[in-house]
Image: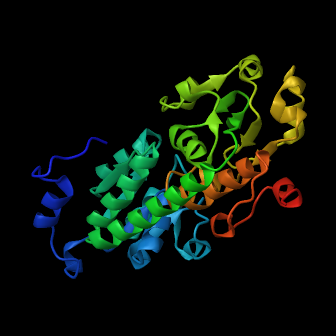
Amino acid sequence: MQPFEKDQPVMSDVIHLIEPKESETKEFPSRIVCLTEETTETFYLLGEDHRIVGVSGYTVRPPRARLKPKVSAFISAKIDKILALRPDLVLAFSDLQADIARDLIGHGLTVFSFNQRSVTAILQMIQTLARLIGASEKGKALVEQLQSGLQAIRVSAAHFPHRPRVLFEEWKDPLISGIRWVEELIEIAGGDPVFPELRAHVLAKDRILRPAQVIERDPEVIIGSWCGVKVNKNYIRSREGWSQISAVRNHHLYEIKSTYILQPGPAALTEGVRQLHAILARVVNVEVDSRLAPEERMDPDLIVQKR
């Protein structure tokens, strides 16, 4: 991001000038449907979860959010059920939910679709969401808290004796490398992605790898998160020629649950990056400050072999 000149107006300042007071809640949406988990989690972290009237069936964070009416999968939704909830705002994500958004707009609903694909864009999503409901100050505080946590991980990773080469598997067959925010979090956590040139590709089909390409890059650690499917480490080991890869030879194969890392929201910037950092710290044999340790379910191999 380019620095602003001293007297240059900042967009957030302009928005603040025209934005109604947070107390004027009747001016803002109060019945909101979230079609993906990251916006739901953000509402809870903002203390504004009372506005949510419907969530995705895939929502697991926070657990109590599952008590809300479930109205969608990821690329499908129960339109009649959403209409019955009388939402004044529906939050969607990316082109993958474009058909749902079109149908809801056709029924007269207001739909706001995010498309965050990087760490910076995730933080912008959180601040934008807060503004949509008149909670700018809460959004600013949450963003600052998340940025502080990421910076603490960066500082810790700076003490690693070296940065391990990392392959992140978003899917197994075809083999797909990590999306942009994941690759950025790997770097923050202390690793170097072995296919950094692919991160800019939004579509998974543009990040497909041939197994032989991975052998050439020789990752020191392989981290899988197979979109809700349990990672099979024996499957990874059995790929032709992969026995010569450093990560396989040295038993550095790990899994991070997709709910922690593959949803572009608060989970990835907290638990997701913490698990990445813990894995990489073990690979380089460095003790992690307990304040930066993961707080939720980790790969059993990481727990067993933890120092």
- Say above or below: 241 vs 74: above
Please report the residue visible at 50 percent of the width from the left and 66 percent of the height from the top.
Answer: 41
Q: Is residue 239 left or right of residue 82?
A: right
**Residue 247 quadrant:** top right
Between residue 35 and residue 2, name the one nearer to us. 2
Measured as percent of width and height from the top left, residue 90 is found at: 36, 59
**Residue 155 quadrant:** bottom right
Measured as percent of width and height from the top left, residue 256 is found at: 71, 51
Query: Which part of the image, by quadrant, shows the C terminus?
Result: bottom right
Please report the residue visible at 64 percent of the width from the left and 41 percent of the height from the top.
Answer: 191
Between residue 112 and residue 166, name the one nearer to us. 166
Please report the residue visible at 15 percent of the width from the left and 72 percent of the height from the top.
Answer: 20
How many labels were placed on the picture? Answer: 0
Q: Is residue 14 left or right of residue 256?
A: left
Query: Which part of the image, by quadrant, shows the N terminus?
Result: top left
Visible residue check, residue 207: yes
- Say above or below: 225 vs 55: above
Between residue 170 and residue 158, name the one nearer to us. 158
- Say above or below: 74 vs 138: above
Between residue 140 and residue 49, name the one nearer to us. 140
- Say above or below: 286 vs 251: below
Colour convention of the picture: rainbow
Please report the residue visible at 16 percent of the width from the left and 65 percent of the height from the top.
Answer: 16
Measured as percent of width and height from the top left, residue 289 is found at: 67, 65
Measured as percent of width and height from the top left, residue 305 is found at: 88, 56
Visible residue check, residue 37: no
